[in-house]
């Protein structure tokens, strides 16, 4: 008998070279149905990022890298002169970059792709397009290695049987494999550890309920779903040994933007003396943004709060709604930032620089 395919067997985000398409799981349909989208059109890729069909900082970065490659392929078929190619490439890049403002992985991946164009400027356009293909594939493969490394580092912070609380979805569905906040759990599971995970539902878009609870359950991890307003009580009950969250942008001083509600979890964690860890690949660390105050926070439509996920609108018509998608957790509430090069500890202004020094060293040794 063949085993049933689970959500863990699908690629969150991939490139189909035969169809020249970005392939994603439509995350707005989970957990009810697993619908695979094959996107070839730049506008559709922009929509997929904006509508959260593909979401989570690392997955957005990978999708953007594949998306800009696919567009460059089309541009390359029309323009053989570098200047004309580059002008259209830049326009497409800026367009994709406008889909969501907070997750820095989007511009990080697009800038990296642009760098490939500029470095290979002297070559024929067709060759540049081939280099873009290889870079997009590398960005995707790198995400797997990076998340796995974060998992190894994160696992040193917990032990078998621990209670772990997480917020939003920083899991496999937010990346390619392993996820960021879930990486220590999946790596631990590979080594035979078990954990008791509490997943915050994460209002208003319910990424914790629809995605984290789903993928952890499908993976065979012990997961309990709680409403956002229950996490303080769960911590008070003594059920949580550590908190792991993902992030969308880390500022140079260690302030962290992540899904709305993360800062409240960090405040409660401090009150209960529970370590609060942020898992952040270096692609999510933005040393050009000095503090959390300078991070642009995405504001989203009121309907996400008043209507989505309900059979009927549940709030009074015309009521004012404030719907920021992210908030900033101040660095003094963060016990450690887990990266692929190790764990940064306060003061983050110094430790994050040390992490990047390790990254440079690793690049030189390649
Ligand atoms: O709006 P979303 O669903 O893209 O927000 C996702 C988050 O806030 C995640 O915690 C973050 O991107 C880290 S994903 C590994």
Image (cartoon, helix red, strand yellow):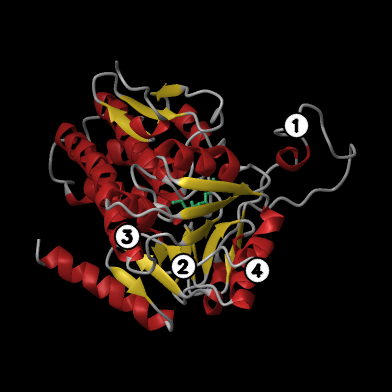
Q: Looking at the image, which residue sits at the far top?
A: 1
The answer to which of marks 4 and 1 sits earlier in the sequence is 4
Mark 2 and mark 1: Cα distance apart in space: 33 Å
Q: Is residue 54 left or right of residue 78?
A: right
What residue sits right under mark 4 in the picture? 236
User: In front: 184, or 364?
Assistant: 184
Locate residue 338: give its quadrant. bottom left
Q: Are marks 2 and 1 in contact (CB under 8 Å)?
A: no
- Spatial separation of the CA atoms under disc 1 and disc 3: 37 Å
Q: Residues within 10 Å of mark 3 (few under 14, many from 20)?
A: many
Q: To which residue does mark 3 refer?
A: 150
Q: Is residue 59 above or below residue 365?
A: above
CA–CA distance between discs 4 and 1? 31 Å
Give how far across and how far down residue 327 sits, in percent. Answer: 61, 61
Between 175 and 130, the one nearer to me in the picture? 175
* Residue 325 x, y percent position in the rendering: 63, 51
Q: Who comes first in sequence, dot 1 or dot 3?
A: 3
Residue at the (43%, 84%) spot, across then down: 347
Cα distance between the residues tagged 4 and 2: 18 Å
Quadrant showing the C terminus = bottom left
Q: Kindly identify the residue that appears in the image at 57 percent across and 37 percent down.
A: 210
Q: Residue 277: which numbered mark, if any?
A: 2
Name the residue rendered at 22%, 72% in the picture: 358
Q: Residue 287: in sight, yes or no?
A: no
Relative to 35, 319 lies left or right: right
Residue bearing the label numbered 1: 310
First in residue order: circle 2 vs circle 3: 3
Give SS at disc 2: strand
């Amino acid at each position: 008998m063949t085993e049933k395919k689970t959500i863990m067997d699908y690629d969150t985000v991939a490139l189909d070279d035969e169809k020249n398409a970005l392939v994603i799981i439509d995350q707005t349909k989970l957990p009810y149905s697993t619908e695979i989208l094959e996107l070839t059109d730049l506008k559709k890729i922009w929509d997929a990022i904006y509508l959260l069909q593909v979401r989570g900082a690392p997955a957005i970065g990978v999708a953007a890298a594949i998306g800009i490659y696919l567009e460059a392929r089309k541009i390359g078929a029309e323009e053989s002169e570098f200047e004309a190619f580059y002008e259209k490439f830049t326009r497409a890049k800026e367009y994709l970059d406008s889909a969501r403002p907070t997750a820095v992985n989007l511009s990080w991946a697009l800038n990296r792709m642009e760098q490939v164009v500029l470095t290979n400027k002297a070559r024929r356009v067709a060759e540049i397009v081939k280099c873009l293909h290889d870079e997009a594939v590398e960005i995707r493969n790198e995400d797997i290695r990076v998340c796995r490394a974060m998992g190894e580092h994160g696992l040193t912070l917990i032990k078998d049987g621990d209670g772990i609380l997480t917020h939003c979805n920083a899991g496999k569905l937010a990346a390619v494999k392993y996820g960021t906040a879930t990486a220590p759990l999946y790596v631990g599971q590979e080594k035979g550890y078990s954990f008791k995970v509490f997943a915050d539902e994460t209002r208003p878009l319910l990424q914790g309920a629809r995605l984290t609870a789903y993928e952890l359950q499908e993976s065979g991890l012990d997961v309990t779903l709680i409403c956002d307003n229950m996490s303080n009580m769960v911590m008070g009950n003594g059920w949580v040994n550590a908190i792991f969250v993902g992030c969308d942008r880390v500022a140079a001083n260690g302030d962290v933007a992540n899904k709305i509600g993360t800062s409240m979890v960090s405040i409660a964690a401090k009150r209960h003396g529970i370590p609060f860890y942020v898992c952040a690949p270096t692609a999510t660390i933005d040393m050009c943004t000095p503090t959390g105050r300078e991070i642009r926070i995405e504001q989203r439509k009121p309907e996400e709060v008043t209507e989505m996920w309900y059979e009927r609108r549940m709030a009074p018509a015309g009521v004012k709604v404030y719907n920021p998608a992210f908030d900033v957790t101040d660095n003094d509430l963060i016990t450690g930032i887990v990266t692929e090069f190790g764990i940064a500890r306060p003061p983050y202004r110094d430790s994050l620089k040390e992490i990047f020094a390790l990254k440079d060293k690793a690049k030189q040794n390649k």
